[in-house]
Image: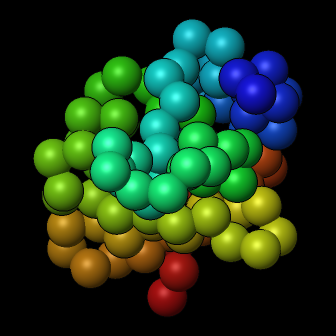
Amino acid sequence: MRDLVVLRDQHCVFPWCTRDARSCDLDHIDPYDETGPPGQTHPDNLAALCRRHHRCKTSGRWRYRRNPDGSYHWTAPTGQTYTVAVTGTHANH
């Protein structure tokens, strides 16, 4: 499962981060719930985040979701949104 996510994401999926996905943590996009249903850990609910950006997300300052096309939609603490794809980061206006 890790290999699939690393190959899919290629780099940390935080806006403008270029750290190679091989050195990233795998983050549950929807938080893991120990008492929740089985199957919460699957590639569609995992993303590569470097340790620094994993902490930004976990602190609740930044939020994100995975789009149907495989890109990621991030919301900054300021409300600004960004789309991150394998090709790079784009600010949404």
Q: Where is residue 35 shown, x and y percent of the image?
A: 32, 51
- Quarter of the image for the N terminus: give it: top right
Res 73 → quadrant: bottom right
Is residue 64 or residue 11 the one in the foreground?
Answer: 64
Q: Residue at x 28, y 58 (%)?
A: 62
Point 71% across, 62% down: residue: 71
User: Which percent across, then down, holds residue 77?
Assistant: 19, 67
- Residue at left offset 72%, top offset 44%: 43
Most extreme residue toward the top, as rendered?
Answer: 23
- Does residue 11 appear anywhere in the picture? yes
Residue 85 % position (x, y): 72, 55
Is residue 46 at all visible to an observer of this figure? Answer: no
Residue at 34 percent across and 77 percent down: it is: 80
Q: Residue furthest bottom?
A: 93
Left or right position of 47 against 78: right
Say whether residue 86 is left or right of residue 67. Answer: right
Residue 51 higher or lower than 87, as above or below: above
Q: Is residue 25 toward the left or the right of residue 46 in the image? A: left
Q: Is residue 91 left or right of residue 20?
A: left
> Looking at the image, which is closer to me, 43 or 48?
43
